[in-house]
Image: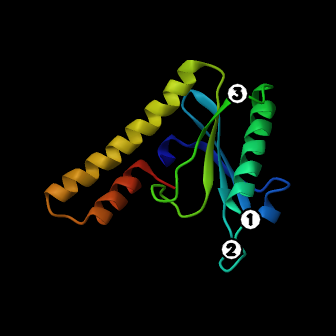
Amino acid sequence: MRNFMLDRQTLVPPGYAERSCLLVKYRLPLLRHCFVLCHAPAAGAPAQPREQLLGFFLAQAHELAHAAVGDPQAFMLIHSGASIRKRANLHLHVFVIQHRWQKAWVYTVLGAKNLMLACTAAVACLFGRKKGAAIARAKAQVGEQ
């Protein structure tokens, strides 16, 4: 999805460092305010309780929406459980939206990206290639971070 991630910045705002967290700020075509709140602990660092991190991430989503458009409720969240997410670390996608078409657009972009990855993996399996290698190539093509 990196090809779609325009003006990507990795930040450590106040309150993030002590939680071993990062804020990735970017925009999508037609959507100006997109974020990924990431827990990125150093190797061997004590783990933060998941519930505390999710509470912090939710409070940050409210603040990001308020700062972006003046409405702390103008956002949607996407969180994947540990068994299906790409990365092992806890992270939460925040999309600041004000209209239903923006919500549909977010799902369209994510759906197209995931459909392409699934199709690439299926074609690779049909031709006897390793699934992991096919997925890695597909992610490289769409510029996954």
Residue 46: percent from left, percent from top: 72, 75
Q: Is residue 52 left or right of residue 111?
A: right
Give the mark, 1 or 2, whose residue is nearer the N terminus: 1
What residue is shown with label 3?
A: 74
Mark 1 or 3, nearer chain start: 1
Residue 73 percent coordinates (x, y): 73, 28
Q: Mark 1: which amino acid?
A: Ser
- The tag earlier along the polypeptide, 2 or 3, is 2
* Colour convention of the picture: rainbow
User: Mark 2, residues whose alpha carbon is within 10 Å: few (<14), some, or many (≥20)?
Assistant: few
- Residue 116, given in percent of the width and then of the height, sits at 33, 44
Q: Mark number for residue 60? A: none
Residue type beneath disc 3: Ala
At 20% from the left and 64% from the top, the residue drawn is: 129
Q: Which residue is mark 1?
A: 20
Q: Between marks 1 and 2, how big is the CA–CA gap?
A: 8 Å
Check contact, mark 1 vs mark 2: CB within 8 A. Answer: yes
In the image, 59: left or right of 87?
right
| Mark 2 → mark 3, Cα distance in angstroms | 32 Å
Residue position for label 2? 42
Numbered disc 1: secondary structure: loop
Q: Is residue 32 above or below residue 20?
A: above
Q: Quadrant of residue 59?
A: top right
Q: Is residue 91 above or below residue 94?
A: below
Residue, x 39% and y 44% (percent of image)? 114
Q: Residues within 10 Å of mark 1 (few under 14, many from 20)?
A: some
Determine the image quadrant of residue 71.
top right
Question: At 54% across and 64% down in the image, what residue appears?
Answer: 88
Question: In what element is the residue under mark 2?
Answer: loop
Q: Quadrant of residue 111?
A: top left
Is residue 77 shown left or right of residue 49? left
Badge 3 density bin: few <14, some 14–19, many ≥20, Cα 10 Å: some
